[in-house]
Image (tube, coloured by chain):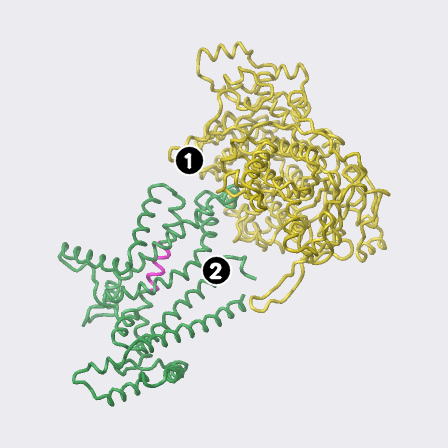
Amino acid sequence: MSVETIETAETTEVRPGDETPVLEVTDLTVTFRGLNGNPDVHAVRGVGYSVRRGEVLGIVGESGSGKSVSSMAAMGLLPDHAVITGSVKLHGEEILGLDDRAMAARRGKVISMVFQDPLSGLTPVYTVGDQLAEAVLVHNPRLPKEQARKRAVHLLDLVGIPNPEGRYRSFPHEFSGGMRQRVMIAMAMANDPDVIICDEPTTALDVTIQAQILDLLRTAREETGAAIVMITHDLGVVAGFVDRVLVMYAGRPVEMGGVDEIYYGSRMPYTMGLLGAVPRMDLERQGALVPIKGTPPSLSDLPPGCPFAPRCPIVRPECSLAEPDLLPVGGQPSAETIEEVHGHTDDTSATGVRDTGVQRVACIRSGEIADRGWTAQDIYPVPDIPEVPVADVRREDRAEMLRVEGLTKHHPLTKGAVFKRRVGTVYAVDGIDFDIREGETLALVGESGCGKSTTLMEIMGLERPQAGSITVMGHDTASLGKTDRFALRRDMQIVFQDPMSSLDPRMPVFDIIAEPLRTHRFSQADTTRRVYELIELVGLNPEHATRFPSEFSGGQRQRIGIARALALEPKLLVLDEPVSALDVSIQAGVVNLLEELQARLGLSYLFVAHDLSVVRHIADRVAVMYLGRIVEIGDTESVYTKPAHPYTQALLSAIPIPDPERERARTHIVLDGDLPSPANPPSGCRFRTRCQKFITLSEPEQERCMSVEPSLDATNGGDQAAACHFAERQRVL
Amino acid sequence: MGKFLVRRLLNYVVLIFLATSFAYLLAATNLYPRGYFEQMQPPPTPEAVNAQLDALNLNDQTPLAQRYVTWLTGVVQGDFGQTIQGRDVTDQVWLKAGVTLRLITVATILGSFLGIAIGAYAAVRQYRRFDKAATVASFVVLAIPTVVIALSVQIGATAINGALGFQLFLFSGEYSAGFRGEWWELLLNRLHHAILPTFVLAVALFAAFARYQRNMMLDVLGADFVRTAMAKGLTRRKALLKHALRTALIPTITYFTFTFGLMVAGATFTEKIYGWHGMGAWLIDSISQQDVHVVAAVSCFMAVTIMIASFLSDILYAWLDPRVRV
């Protein structure tokens, strides 16, 4: 039975000039029934879109906006207890409500999916090749095993796995994250599907790998001619990759249109806020980010009317009467009509949400926004962030907060249980130097595994390093006694990456913030006063003090973490990826807070991040790390506008910018392969194995790269320095 | 891999040696074989008792170390000494080990398979009727000691037999005494006798496995790789069997080693209650008869079976999980 339907699907597909969308979703709703008296969760509330062959649709939204759930519903991958209504048509044929066998025959064949987390996406106990071959075999059970194997090897080759024959027999744990994502894409391409849904395919990956994967997805689209639905929260990824955009909020589409229409002419305050909240790597001076106040509503207890109304800066009373439909700009009913309709009937259910192809907005003021040409900066109150007080003083004249010289951390690799013997060394941090002056922010950037977190931990330990020295505010950590070390900790505090796990879930907020104070023996009265002061300072309410971390959103928790770090009035704050776990709209508020605190309290920051856009926004100086070494360091503006090291250039080039026109015009430098193992770094220059410049050099020059390790030399006569024999300052943005 | 297993095997040999030695030393210091002879009727002379004890290497007047060395020398040559009645322990071990192993092996296979299947299915049907029933059943079994289960089953069987008017269930002995017939009749007779004790043992194992497998399965049910498998076109059923269950089996294999000890202990009571002359029943009898050598021999047997079980689970683990194959 299922075979027949596939055949009909194929015949419709080959008809020339076929205008039926490959995938058409209309008025889709997904509700998870609450168990044990819990309220139902309305995860998706009326989503509609359609994609044609070769078209790319972007679905953008923050976590919990229903973007993943709606596509899982289309794939038939949701658990049984999800109640799905509406319509999902594949080649004009309704597939919602088909049984699992009929859906399985389409999944992977006509419609396939690439998921977010490649590390857990492959079954650990089967070889990569067998899992690929399975994808082929499950739809052609009569195909000989040998042919399925050949097809799998071919697919591995297609997605750029080196030595595909040999790698066929590798297990997933032997592959890096980027390579596993390639395998996932190969799996999605295996049967030449007509639609590929990509659910945050690059979120878990480093930027250079992200660039590789995005390239690969373009190849996949050309290879299979498939339509792509790209689900992401990253507005940069969407800008250069998609044709049309659907913005979701609280389970509903709130704006839809061509990518240029949305990016340059958004008429929905939420979308405008999102675009304003993104730190821009390509802008010289962006000013404060646009923070959207509050948090997304709970999907089990939505406010009446527009779900964005509680957070909207231009909210009107009629906004909370009825939820606006997705209508063309200016096509919303007037305030009077809404009130009238609301007075007569309680029926606020939206009419069928389907894709019409023109820009449509679910905001009753969309016409007004268009007429007045408002931008995010016009409607959102942007905080005024004062300048750092010492900004006028020359850098050399400012006090030194932290100096790191030749810092080294090697981990031994041992073997054997009883008689341990050393079989190698992981060169986690291998001799790095930098300093931080008063009121300054130094950002340490690099891909995962480059040693930036190890550097932080070494500094925070305040111990004698394996080699080199760490000097905190004039005290060499090697010479510190126990009491001195304890005293010095007051001046240097840390904010961690994950606000969920870095706060004790069994402690109320008051105790969390008071803990450092109690440890350092503040009196009870002083502690109480200081805690309330801090709660105020980071923008929380005093009544929050008695609540537990689980009652807060990610952004609020990170504020609690910042308050705890500030409790002892430190002069240096170490920030370990403080905003990478937060949604864009929340991230903007925390970034603004950090900037404001720096200006008000004269703090110095050591900021560790992999997101170069945030770094550009917040940092005064940047140090780029690669395999335990700093390859380039300098003031943010010089490094971003004229990077000298090929790695910095590649890194900056790999980041997509949220500006469709500029993004389409850019050519990305895409690095080959993965980061080499820090246990076995390449000889000479560590970056040479992936360097885009290395291959253009002559043989004697290459010889130099391979044998001589470059030192960090000044490149512009000033602050900027790069560790490359052939450093050349270039614009890449 | 081979090297790893050889190393493991060496470890096991050392462990078996230690376990058996400790059992011997414990039995030799705490049991009182002299009492066994002294209470004989007519009471033998002290000289006769000493002579008897010396012949059996059980005399508490000989230093413990000397007795231990004598015993150990025998063990190394495959001789576990003599029972207190003067018969060879080693011969008896082979006889009785067969009985116990039959019981244990069948019950283990039955119990673990049933437990894994029911546990895995219960996880798939989490909070549904099947899951709830399976949970209640396994907790009831886990809460009751094997002795009580064995006795209750026996009483239940008696009641059923009484109601039916003929012997549907047999619960005494390994086969009907004096039974004569063709080999297949004999086999049938033995099987008939084996039903109840095997059931008792299997049911305890089933409960432990069902709980454990249910938890393991729940962990992987929501795993991304199961979703991936479905996304490439497998039905839910097939994805669960081929990808989820296969992965969830790995931790259960390690668990197998732990439950096997439970099994051996359970077998002791079951044999005694159902009148099987296996290792377990022998151990209990020998303790009441102050029989040091039998206690040590049975301990050695148990250590060996448990070590074989963990060796098997090591091999199975390596076979199931490519990540530990180096």
Judging from the image, what secondary structure is the residue with disc 1 in?
loop
From the image, tell me which residue sits under label 1.
Answer: A81
Of A376 and B226, the residue lying toward us: A376
A361 to the left or right of B148: right
Q: Residue A518 location in percent, x, y?
A: 56, 44
Three-letter amino acid code at the position of disc 1: His
A134 to the left or right of A344: right
- Asked which quadrant contains residue A569, the reply is top right
Instruction: Give the CA separation, mark 1 to mark 2.
Output: 35 Å
Up-down relation of residue A613 to residue B70 (above or below): above
Boundaries of the magenta span: B104-114
Of A239 and A467, the residue lying toward us: A467
Three-letter amino acid code at the position of disc 2: Tyr
| x 75%, y 30%: residue | A285
Q: Residue A165 location in percent, x, y?
A: 63, 54
Judging from the image, what secondary structure is the residue with disc 2 in?
helix
- Magenta includes A27? no
Q: Are marks 1 and 2 in contact (CB under 8 Å)?
A: no
Up-down relation of residue A682 to residue A312 (above or below): below
* Residue A447 seen by the camera: yes
